[in-house]
Amino acid sequence: MSNSVPKARRYLLGIETSCDDTGVAILDDEGKVLANELLSQIDAHQVFNGVVPEIASRKHFETIHTLLDRALESAGLSWGDLSAVACTIGPGLIGSLLVGVCTGKAVACALGIPFIPVNHLIGHIFSNALTHPELAPPFIVLLVSGGHTDLYAVVSYEDLRHLGGTLDDAAGEAFDKGARILGLPYPGGPSVSKAAETGDPHSVRFPLPLKKQGTMDFSFSGLKTALLYHMKKHPDSSVSDAAASYQEAITDILVEKTFLAGRQTGYRKLVFAGGVSANRALREKARSRAAKWGYTVFFPRVEDCMDNAAMIARAGWHALWSGAVHQPKATVDSSLTIEKTQAVTKGSGSSKA
Ligand code: KG4
Ligand code: ZN
């Protein structure tokens, strides 16, 4: 029998309220998820065909305390066991962010533990680390969510270099707007993807903006307009065929540009993150090209692609391991970018942003 005293575990609370999902998670100091509570507000927003900010913040406010209690209960912990709070401070809806940040700061203040601000987009990148703990930079990441479509070279987690991004709509936005045109329910990504399952992806030839040009930028607004014209011109055409062809065009462009980034940087690891990375066609296409061209691709688990607090807590652990300290003055920023976060981190001489 060993005489060594077992090391006391440390537990980190993660909070995510940037949009229409209220998330609370608890991770131990090995990054193991002990609780990951999520309450989706889809039902409340579906009737409006999109997220209504005022409703979103009210719903976060009504439910966050219940989720905190539930997370502690399912992790088998009490308040006093928590060592730090990691919380999304942006980008996102300002009212929604405020609910999470006020809650997170109140918990940190009451318990005398550090409050660690997390950029939601960096959280999405860390959703991969939940499933692939071995994943380490350098790698390429394609961040594809409702509001973002960006390619970064992740030299280290503190040094992300922007390679390209969308010039107009984000890929998730293209799915959401496409669904509206096709008369499919919000959120558009899952419903276009479902309709596409029974459709022919080669039935309609949509334009592939910027696909063959050497740039790592994207453009999706012309594609959405092409779908609109197609449905106006052929009102009785199959919705499944149009959905499958539209999805084919979006995923073709995403895969093409991500592999271009790999080729141009020489990085062989390609990582996908954000809501759109749940898309099955995207996963299949990326995996088959990776097998052919000798790359390794990483996707989060489908349930971790969407907004959740476990990814925020995982990013928070990384910040703490890198030397971050209590940041009580960190505040919400609805248009926070990765560049702004890096500037703050570098400006403080460490990750003590
Ligand atoms: O990352 P996320 O949950 O929230 C943001 O930070 O924006 O991403 C939401 C976006 C929505 O636009 C949604 O339509 C899209 O991700 N999405 C999908 C799929 N699931 C969610 N897009 C394509 N295929 C899916 N299966
Ligand atoms: Zn997100």
Image (spheres, helix red, strand yellow):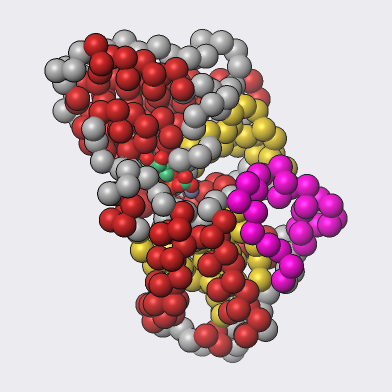
**Residue 112 visible to an observer of this rendering:** yes
Q: Main SS of the magenta segment?
A: loop
Quarter of the rendering containing residue 261: top right
Q: Which percent across, then down, holds residue 38? A: 38, 63
**Residue 272 visible to an observer of this rendering:** no
**In the shown orientation, is residue 11 left or right of residue 193?**
right
In percent of the image, x 59 and y 29: which residue is there?
165
In percent of the image, x 71 and y 50: which residue is there?
341
Quarter of the rendering containing residue 215: top right
In percent of the image, x 34 and y 29: which residue is there?
178
Magenta-span inclusion, residue 340: yes
Q: Which residues are drawn in magenta?
A: 328-353
Classify 248 as above or below 205: below
Quarter of the rendering containing residue 49: top left
Q: Which percent across, then down, holds residue 273? A: 49, 42
Classify 48 as above or below 220: below
**262 or 224: nearer the eye?**
224
In percent of the image, x 52 and y 49: which residue is there?
124
Quarter of the picture containing the C terminus is bottom right
Tally of numbered tags: 0
**In the shown orientation, is residue 127 left or right of residue 85?**
left
Q: Which percent across, then down, holds residue 246? A: 32, 22
**In the shown orientation, is residue 51 left or right of residue 244?**
right
Classify 210 as above or below 94: above
Q: Which percent across, then down, holds residue 349? A: 85, 55
Magenta-span inclusion, residue 153: no
